[in-house]
Image: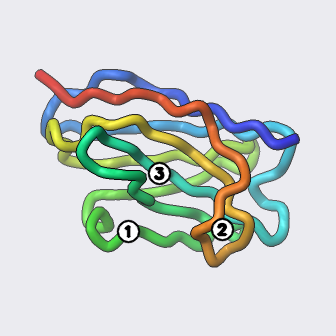
Amino acid sequence: QVQLQESGPGLVKPSQTLSLTCTVSGGSITASYYAWSWIRQSPGQGLEWMARITYGGNTYYNPSLKSRTSISRDTSKNQFSLQLNSVTPEDTALYYCAKDRTVFGGSFDYWGQGTQVTVSS
């Protein structure tokens, strides 16, 4: 059974970088043919997919966030991470990491519990 858990600071100051890490257990982030994503949810928006990284290390981004988003991984720790630069209060949301069924994305079979991130001075 795959389990994912988000970690990182719950409060980030405006203009700074939001950094989160997802720790995966019960499965390898390099296992064929899956991918691993970050999704967020804010009160006004629905679920917004942000980025994913495939088992082979290819990355894909939501065009609306691409300019300030980076997804990466540490295979030795079975972790993948999210960086969101130049944050504003509009980036306040519940952030999830999730497993994609395939490299094509759009279908998540496992989710973390989510972590609340607030952008405020």
Q: Measured from the top left, where is residue 4 in percent x and y? A: 69, 38
Looking at the image, do the residues carrying marks 2 and 3 touch, with CB atoms under 8 Å apart?
no
Residue occupying the point 61% across, 52% down: 73
The percent position of residue 33, horizontal first and vertical second, equals 80, 71
Q: Residue at x 53, y 70 (%)?
A: 59
Q: What residue would you read off at disc 2? A: 54
Quarter of the N terminus within the rendering? top right
- Residue 83's spot in the image, x, y percent? 39, 47
What is the three-letter code of the residue carrying label 2? Thr
Q: Secondary structure at mark 3?
A: strand
Where disc 2 sits, the SS reads strand
- Rounded to the nearest angstrom, the CA distance separating label 1 from label 2 is 15 Å
**Residue 45 picture location, percent across and down:** 29, 50
- Amino acid under disc 3: Ile
Residue 26: quadrant of the picture: top right
Which amino acid, by three-letter code, is at mark 1? Asn
Compute the Cα span from label 2 to label 3. 15 Å
**Numbered circle sitting on residue 62:** 1
Dot 1 falls on a residue whose secondary structure is: loop
Indicate how the structure is coloured in the image. Answer: rainbow
10 Å crowding of disc 3: few (<14), some (14-19), many (20+): some
**What's the residue at 39%, 23% (across, down)?**
9
Identified at 33% across, 37% down, the residue is 93
Which quarter of the rendering shows the C terminus?
Answer: top left
Where is mark 3, residue-wise?
A: 39
The answer to which of marks 2 and 3 sits earlier in the sequence is: 3
Q: Residues within 10 Å of mark 1 (few under 14, many from 20)?
A: few
Q: Earlier in the sequence, mark 1 or mark 2?
A: 2
